[in-house]
Amino acid sequence: MTGIIGYGTAIPKYRIKLADIAAVWNKNPDEIIGGLRVAEKAVPAIDEDAVTLGIEAGKKAFTMAGIQPTTVGSVYFGSESHPYTVNPSSSIAAEYLGIGNDYFAADLEFACKAATAGMQATVGLLDSKRINYGLVIGSDTAQGKPHDSLEYTAASTGCAYLLGNKKTEIIASILEMTSFTSDTPDFWRREGARYPSHFGRFTGEPAYFTHVVSAGKKLLEKTGLHPSDFSYCVFHMPNGKFPRIAAKKMGFTPEQLAPSLTVDKIGNPYSASSLLGLAAVLDIAKPKEKIFFVSYGSGAGADGFIFETTEQLPKKQKKTIPVFDQIENKTYISYAQYLKQTHII
């Protein structure tokens, strides 16, 4: 058995309302908010980056798991906004978390699914008995060019997951996983470019939906399960509309999806998006409940997992600050302050 033994999340307290962004560009805020189904987004403090958020999330994951950092045998750090082009985020995080020196490490980039790719690699190491525990971090301080559609949703959050293979420690076992990948360049950023580019509406049907639904169908085919067999579903959340459409396409109900929808209030923190939705579900889930999960990364690919919660979950839930409690701990800032904190000016 392999699965999650602890998780942690770090959501910056600063928020900017989409209405305030729209006002700067003389756009109708109701159209923007209604079209994206996002009201506000999380903004990093001026001294926060993907690594600092990842470290804070990692600390919480260790508190929940109750293991010593030096027992961790791998660290994978997924992000689109690594602070350094050359100098790994994984080693910085591991150093500050006290993991030591005896571990596999890599920084991963696959748009918004970099961290779930790291989770798959960690499962392989655990299943082969190469390690006893592995740490996966998905963290981003996502960038969007001013006056671009991404500016309304690109957000910031860090998530950390500790995985292990001891049955008595697992809070959510991994029953199955899959991926669906193709060369579909809906979103990209060349070396040296400050902001990403995208194909606008092209990012929907041929990119996000094709990959997410295909990976999801593979999960169901491999396991023989049906949407009705799951208590919850979680999808990557580039905006508030896409996961709702994906869930409907796959036969899930709004009630199965609703607990994971963090995007409505904090936007899309890229590599942390689907992992934050999973954490929100784990905050409230009960033992023996199945969770359907599909991430997405532009370029393009989707990773699917089926989790099943265990009897260990309730006692460990007491050791975390629920995601939605963190979301409500917020301070609103102006557009000018937003530009400063995101280093645009």
Image (cartoon, rainbow, N blue to C red):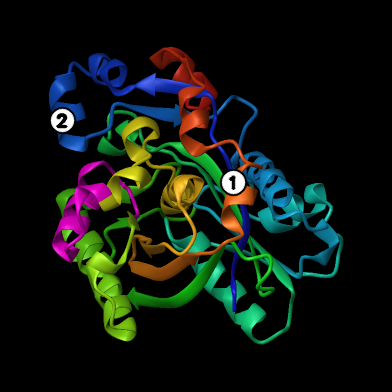
Q: Position of residue 237 (x, y in %)?
A: 32, 48
In the image, 305 versus 20, the foreground residue is 305
Does the magenta portion include 248?
Answer: yes
Numbered range of the magenta stretch: 235-255
- How far apart marks 1 and 2 lie (CA) works out to 34 Å
From the image, tell me which residue sits under label 1: 317
Q: Position of residue 310 (x, y in %)?
A: 54, 64
Which callout, 1 or 2, points at the residue further toward the start of the chain?
A: 2
In the image, 191 versus 23, the foreground residue is 23
Q: Is residue 62 above or below residue 42?
A: below
Does the magenta portion include 314?
Answer: no
Name the residue type under label 2. Gly
Q: Could you tell me which residue is drawn at 23 percent across and 66 percent down? A: 228
Q: Could you tell me which residue is drawn at 24 percent across and 67 percent down? A: 227
Q: Is residue 37 above or below residue 256?
A: above
Q: Position of residue 197 (x, y in %)?
A: 32, 48
Q: Is residue 79 above or below residue 265?
A: below
Q: Secondary structure at mark 2?
A: helix
* Image quadrant where residue 38 sits: top left
Mark 1 in CB contact with mark 2 (< 8 angstroms): no
Q: Could you tell me which residue is drawn at 45 percent across and 51 percent down? A: 285
From the image, tell me which residue sits under label 2: 34
Q: Quadrant of the N terminus?
A: bottom right
Q: Position of residue 51 (x, y in %)?
A: 65, 45
Is residue 184 in sight in this rendering? no
Disc 2 residue crowd, few under 14, some 14–19, many 20+, Cα 10 Å: few
* Left or right of 139, for residue 216: left
Q: Is residue 194 above or below residue 124?
A: above
Q: Secondary structure at mark 1?
A: helix
